[in-house]
Image (cartoon, rainbow, N blue to C red):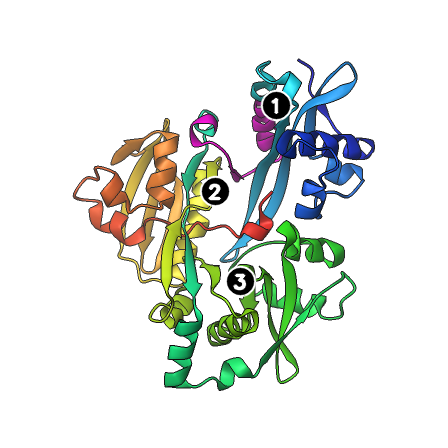
Amino acid sequence: MKIERLGAADMQELLDVLNISFTGRADSRHFEEGLPKLWIPDDEHMGCHFAIRENGGIIAALGVYPLEMAIAGHKLRFSTVGNVATMPEAREKGCMKALMAAAMTELDDIGADVSRLGGRRSRYQRYGYEVAGINYRLTLTDRNVSDYEEQFGAADSDALTFRRIESAEDSELPAIHALYDTQPVRVLRGEGVDFFNILRAWSNLPHAAYRNGCLCGHICAKGGDIAEFCAENDVTAFAMLRAWQKQVNSQISFNIFPWQTGLMRLIGRYNETISVNSPSHFKILNWDRVAAALLNLKLTFSTLCGGCFVLGIDGKRLEIAVDGGKACVGYTEKEPDIRLDGLDAVRFLFGPADPLLAFDVPADIAPAVSSWLPLPLGWNGQDRV
């Protein structure tokens, strides 16, 4: 079964295959409208896609999309595997098995540290992907907002206004991007059109937020369903969320990530509901780099006890240590304190469940495991594919 890398000339045919496979209609425009950042007719964007042809036409395809991430000063390469599609007449022929094998080779070739995807858990566990990570989903109702503001006042939220960002030429985009880049965890997004297309992904509408005429943040949302928000500080973020609730005049929902402890402490007493969700399926290729970045991230917002343990993962031995407020992660020849296969190791390190609840942990390392894990792996849906 021959697999080829696509190019600029293949974009429309690929879109037709994706739209037919997922919606039943080649003209549905589901993918163009949902993910405008991908559909640029050049070899760079289309070269992320692999396909199988039969009688000259594409019958199956998928994409491998590298994303550079900054995590507490560490640079990691995340790579989404997505847009996995097979034409109805070509199913049960082994196309997806062949394409996923090609995708796994591509992840190695591009030096991916982490790969993520969505789909049926048992299907993608075969390739090393496991459901993990933590996103907190909160709701805020009109009653929550009015109760809070009766007690503390509404001056901060009433001072905020919003303006729709309608094009990549908007004069505020560079400032919004600069504010976005202050976040401790972020995808390194492109400039101009690329950045604008991410803000409006999944049919969300981006808005700039102002206080007394000065930019203080942005929100991307469909009514009360907020996909992304960013503000100059946590106090402004809370005021911005309350102002948005009053603007849309309905319940709002939004994600808070594990490292946003200040914001959670502001909102946690007043929001209506909270749920803990795993944002994706993750495959870890470089355990040492990923664990080091996320453990150092956790040290920026938590006090962690000192200690050390060695985790055996499919023949590798990963030593994790915290000493004097500094983290060190690397491979070792020491005997493991606990041995897990790759799927269990993803859940052990990255949650969402407390590892002491989900695994039999030796008593001598339990204090360190309880203090350090799960590591704060989250994912912003605007960057998904």
- Residue, disc 1: 99
In the image, residue 204 sits, relative to residue 85, either above or below, namely below
Q: Nearer the viewer, residue 164 or 346?
A: 164
Tell whether position 189 is magenta: no
261 sits left or right of 45 in the view: left
Q: Quadrant of the C terminus?
A: top right
Q: Secondary structure at mark 1?
A: helix
Q: Decide: few, some or many residues near mark 3? Use Cα within 10 Å; few <14, some 14-19, many ≥20.
A: many
Tag on residue 280? Answer: 2
Q: Secondary structure at mark 3?
A: loop
Q: Residue at image x 39%, y 70%?
A: 267
- For residue 111, say whether it is visible: no
Segment tinted magenta in the rendering: 100-123
209 sits left or right of 245 in the view: right
Q: Nearer the viewer, residue 300 or 172?
A: 172
Percent position (x, y) of residue 163? 67, 72
Q: Earlier in the sequence, mark 3 or mark 1?
A: 1
Q: Nearer the viewer, residue 119 or 144?
A: 144
Residue type marked 3 = Gly
- For residue 284, say whether it is visible: yes
Residue type marked 2 = Ser
Percent position (x, y) of residue 7? 78, 32
Q: Earlier in the sequence, mark 1 or mark 2?
A: 1
55 sits left or right of 333 in the view: right
Q: Residue at image x 56%, y 43%?
A: 78
In the image, residue 197 sits, relative to residue 161, either above or below, namely above
Q: Quadrant of the N terminus?
A: top right
Tag on residue 224? Answer: 3
